[in-house]
Image (cartoon, rainbow, N blue to C red):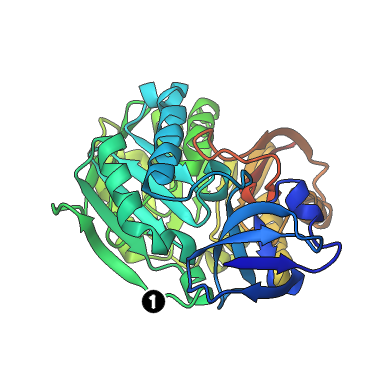
Amino acid sequence: MTLHLKPGREKSLRRRHPWIFSGAVEKVTGKPAAGDTVEVRDASGKTLARAAYSPRSQIRARVWTFDAAEEVDAAFFRRRVSRAIALREALPASRHSNALRLVHGESDGLPGLVVDRYADVLVAQFLAAGVERWRDAILDALVECAGCTAIYERSDAETRKLEGLEARVGFARGDRAATRCPIIEYGLNFRVDVEQGQKTGFFLDQRENRRRIRELAAGREVLDGFSYTGGFAISALAGGATRVLALESSAEALAVARENLAANPLDASKVAFLQADVFAQLRKLRDQGASFDLVVLDPPKFAPTAAQAKNAARAYKDINLLAFKLLRPGGLLATFSCSGGVDAALFQSIVAGAALDAGADARIIERFGAAADHPVALEFPEGDYLKGLLVLKP
């Protein structure tokens, strides 16, 4: 079974980009089903790669290997999974946390697969036709290489619909209570709801950024917007914040946040968890004349794709403008975007516009990204989704 490219449409593959869009395809010979492996050939007939076919998706194929002689079989997936886990075991973070991302999709040569480890439970997401086709072989490899017998599947992301796949949630291997997996991150205790929480239950990509906020929080009054289960708020308190106000719209997330706080030997009287619409509450705080020394903004994904970037830009500008107004002189704003449709340059421009409208002569003093267990392949810039700025308001 072979996928033939249109003339001139092989350039991205020669740069080792793993996606082949439908518009680049001249024809498909044979009758590949969703997830089947196809040879990818340029217009001259030269084989460039072997890829997983996805007839329902605009990303018509995702490359497994650029070695035309490499077989895509169960052994292939065991090698890829083993390599990905070995990379994480060598990271410094593995000595400070028992919660890491073990597989990060395309950047680990496994397009559409995300696997996070929370202590002795793995959480897996199969988000593309190729990994769906090889699901059992991948699960077997994860059990063998990670040493975890319990794997909870969270294949419920919207991207599965684009692949023509139904959502699937539940234990794929093993079975155990997993509504509150206890994890440790730089000495702090957290409870992760892998069954009902956002994404796979916790935002592991922010691990090092939570640690940085902990380092910056001493003696400061902190506002944590979009607090979710309290990761930044609890880190700030552990770092010596004098007061923390954490805003979150989800009552369920705040219930976990309070459990997380109780799991640590911290002064709970210094933290207030408030269920509220963050946009409305920021305006209310502004109108009340409230002020803070450190504001953290880690909102949900406003723009999954570039098509939503315009509306997302307005939302990002709104919350950052309000944050600047709430900052005292000498205060710090740690602001993030996880939207794939908003690149780093656009995000900086949005924050700059917010500062200008707020009359704040602000300065970027640090940049944030995802933790090292979320690597970005050089040939796959789409993997660089998390961006953040630490901004000083003089």
Is any atom of residue 239 visible in this view? no
Q: Is residue 126 left or right of residue 297?
A: left
Residue visible at 51% across and 32% down in the picture: 208
Q: Secondary structure at mark 1?
A: loop
The percent coordinates of residue 96 (x first, y second) are: 37, 24
Q: Number of callouts in the render?
A: 1
Which image quarter: residue 253? bottom left
Q: Quadrant of the C terminus?
A: top right
The percent coordinates of residue 227 (x first, y second) are: 45, 52
Category of crowding for the residue at label 1, using alpha-carbon neighbours closer than 10 angstroms: few (below 14), some (14–19), many (at least 20):
few
From the image, tell me which residue sits under label 1: 166
Q: Is residue 332 left or right of residue 138?
A: right
Decide: is 28 above or below 386. Answer: below
The amino acid type of the residue labelled 1 equals: Glu
Residue most toward the left?
Answer: 176
Decide: is 371 above or below 57. Answer: above
The percent coordinates of residue 26 (x first, y second) are: 75, 74
Q: Quadrant of the N terminus?
A: bottom right
The percent coordinates of residue 45 (x first, y second) are: 76, 60
Q: Which residue is more in the foreground, 214 or 357? A: 214
Q: Is residue 251 left or right of residue 159?
A: left
